């Protein structure tokens, strides 16, 4: 009888232990708890966001999300029609960023349907070979970890489109990397790479390649095979030369070579190259042969070098809009610099210039170019033209020199209510490419501009009183640049979508209350400046269609919130959002620059 009672007491003790109501709160539980409702929702949506949860390991029930029958399905045979486990969706998107993960289990292979895996901002020092079994994977984010190498198996992911591995400890890459034949974006910046595999040239779908902040002393010649790369960033390395094969990169538009050891400007004949950044090198001179190859260049940055002179043939850069010569050893400027028809910004601070008054340098590019043009003597074609060989072109009432030589029709700073017909008459029969009617009192666009519809590519109507558009201007189908800053515009007409060559538009200091709808339809746009207006919202789903857009200024507007989807506009290189009343992203994030802002916004996208 005594034995029976003892057994009964022991049995009851065990039952009490099993139903301990505090068991879920005890620290002895090693596997991190994920709310069951979150897992249940993931089975329906196919997406699971576990970012920023302080995880040190991935819970086993996450790996087995699609392998195990849901718990409530086992317990409840009356599982609702909308919750039937056999109709649940495979997990395709798993976000594990900003945790404390030190390793990833081989069980990751159980999530075979994954197309997006985000592991950035963790403590990973290695990756399992089982990653190679995720054959549906299209996006793999591994930045801000402690990876020292990559498993060869990762290179078998044939469907991978985007691979970001910046801010790791990589010193080398497997030769098999070239097997990722569908990759369009590869970010290897901020590592310790001292060489690149030649197989990199096999990534023929690649459009964006970031190699900055490594220890590269040379680039493989095979890079020339990357015929679809639009942006190549090799800044902050130890490069002394650039392979000539880069000229074969037919789609290359932006090339960053800042902070290297280059002694010469790269001689590149890449036909699409628009922006070349070679600041902070050891370049001593700009050769005519080098400039002649830059047939499409718009931005040339050679600041912080050792350049002493500019060649007279700088005029070869006919498409140049911005030239940065800051902190060089330039002592004189060739007058021919003023003949560049599209030059809008000329930066010369920190040069020992002689013969040019300091106050003239502080007045800006336009005044400096006017001064340089004044040093070019005009030789009249006929004695009765009214100009002698010693007459400065800037002194003529109608400057035919600018019209004939520069193809520029200028009537700026006159405070005029209209443009005189005499100016248009003087340009009759000329293929005018640029018009500058800025700093006047114009309330409408001069109708006679349509006379240059077949050649006009650049219009500056800034600092006027424009409040509407005449649709006729949109017959100028060659227009590439429009400057409408400091006017009274509140909308743009839908007819503007006819400007299929337009690459930049400046609308700062107007009265826009929303992002102009028509701009969403001009897919050639690269620059949109809309600062200092009253814009209250922007549609990222439409902005994503502007695949060439690299600069977007929305500063000092009325944006109460920034949609997280704006972070998907990955072509943006410069995004200005300061001066708006939104609470997030905070100022500290904005101060880190465009890439940090976009990454932050992407992390906020709801799943």
Image (cartoon, helix red, strand yellow):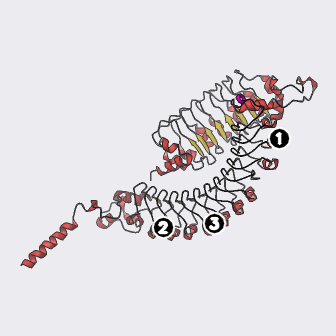
Which element type, helix, strand or loop, lies under badge 2?
loop
Which element type, helix, strand or loop, lies under badge 1?
helix
The Cα–Cα distance between marks 1 and 2, rounded to whole angstroms, is 62 Å
Mark 1: few/some/many CA within 10 Å (<14, 14-19, 20+) = few
Rendered location of residue 127, percent (x, y): 50, 66
Label 1: which residue? 312
The Cα–Cα distance between marks 3 and 2, rounded to whole angstroms, is 23 Å
* Camera-side residue of 361 and 98: 361
357 magenta-colored: yes
Q: Is residue 2 above or below residue 605?
A: below
Label 3: which residue? 178
Rendered location of residue 459, percent (x, y): 71, 33
Label 2: which residue? 112
Tell which tag, 1 or 3, sits nearer the viewer. 1
Q: Is residue 520 visible?
A: no
Rendered location of residue 389, percent (x, y): 89, 27
Q: Is residue 6 above or below residue 505?
A: below
């Amino acid at each position: 009888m005594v034995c029976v009672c003892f057994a009964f007491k022991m049995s009851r003790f065990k039952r009490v232990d099993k139903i301990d109501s505090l068991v879920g709160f005890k620290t002895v539980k090693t596997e991190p708890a994920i709310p069951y409702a979150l897992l249940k929702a993931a089975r329906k949506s196919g997406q699971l966001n576990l970012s920023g949860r302080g995880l040190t390991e991935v819970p086993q029930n996450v790996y087995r999300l699609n392998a195990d029958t849901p718990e409530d399905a086992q317990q409840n045979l009356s599982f609702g029609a909308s919750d039937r486990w056999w109709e649940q969706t495979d997990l395709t998107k798993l976000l594990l960023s900003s945790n404390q993960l030190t390793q990833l289990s081989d069980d990751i292979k159980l999530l075979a349907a994954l197309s997006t895996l985000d592991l950035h901002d963790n403590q990973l020092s290695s990756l399992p070979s089982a990653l190679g079994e995720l054959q549906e994977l299209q996006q793999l984010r591994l930045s801000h970890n402690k990876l020292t190498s990559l498993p060869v198996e990762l290179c078998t992911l044939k469907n991978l489109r985007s691979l970001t591995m910046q801010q790791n400890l990589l010193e080398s890459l497997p030769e098999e990397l070239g097997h990722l034949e569908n990759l369009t974006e590869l970010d290897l910046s901020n590592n310790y790479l001292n060489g690149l595999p030649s197989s990199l040239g096999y990534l023929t779908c690649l459009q964006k390649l970031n190699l900055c902040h490594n220890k590269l002393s040379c680039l493989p010649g095979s890079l020339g095979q990357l015929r679809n790369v639009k942006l190549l960033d090799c800044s902050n390395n130890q490069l002394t030369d650039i392979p000539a094969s880069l000229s074969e990169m037919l789609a290359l538009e932006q090339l960053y070579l800042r902070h290297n050891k280059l002694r010469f400007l790269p001689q590149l004949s890449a036909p699409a190259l628009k922006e070349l950044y070679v600041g902070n090198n050891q370049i001593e001179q700009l050769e005519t042969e080098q400039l002649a190859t830059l047939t499409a260049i718009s931005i040339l940055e050679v600041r912080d070098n050792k350049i002493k002179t500019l060649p007279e043939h700088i005029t070869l850069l006919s498409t140049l809009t911005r030239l940065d010569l800051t902190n060089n050893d330039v002592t004189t400027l060739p007058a021919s610099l003023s003949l560049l028809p599209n030059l809008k910004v000329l930066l010369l601070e920190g040069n020992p210039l002689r013969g040019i008054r300091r106050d003239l340098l502080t007045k800006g590019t336009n005044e400096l170019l006017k001064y340089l043009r004044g040093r070019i003597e005009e030789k009249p074609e006929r004695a009765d033209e009214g100009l002698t060989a010693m007459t400065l072109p800037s002194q003529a009432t109608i400057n035919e020199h600018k019209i004939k030589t520069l193809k520029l029709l200028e009537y700026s700073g006159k405070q005029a209510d209209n443009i005189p017909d005499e100016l248009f008459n003087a340009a009759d029969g000329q293929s005018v490419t640029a018009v500058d009617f800025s700093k006047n009192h114009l309330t409408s666009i001069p109708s006679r501009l349509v006379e240059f519809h077949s050649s006009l590519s650049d219009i500056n109507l800034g600092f006027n009183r424009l409040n509407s558009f005449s649709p006729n201007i949109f017959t100028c189908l060659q227009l590439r640049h429009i400057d409408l800053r400091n006017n009274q515009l509140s909308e743009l007409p839908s007819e503007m979508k006819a400007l299929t060559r337009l690459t930049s538009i400046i609308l700062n200091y107007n009265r826009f209350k929303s992002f102009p709808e028509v701009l969403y339809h001009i897919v050639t746009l690269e620059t949109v400046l809309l600062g200092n207006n009253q814009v209250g919202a922007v549609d990222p789903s439409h902005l994503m269609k502007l695949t060439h857009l690299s600069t977007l200024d929305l500063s000092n507007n009325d944006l109460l919130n920034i949609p997280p989807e704006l972070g998907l506009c990955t072509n943006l290189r410069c995004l200005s959002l300061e001066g708006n009343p939104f609470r997030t992203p905070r100022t500290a994030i904005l101060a880190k620059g465009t890439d940090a802002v976009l990454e932050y916004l992407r992390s906020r996208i709801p799943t």
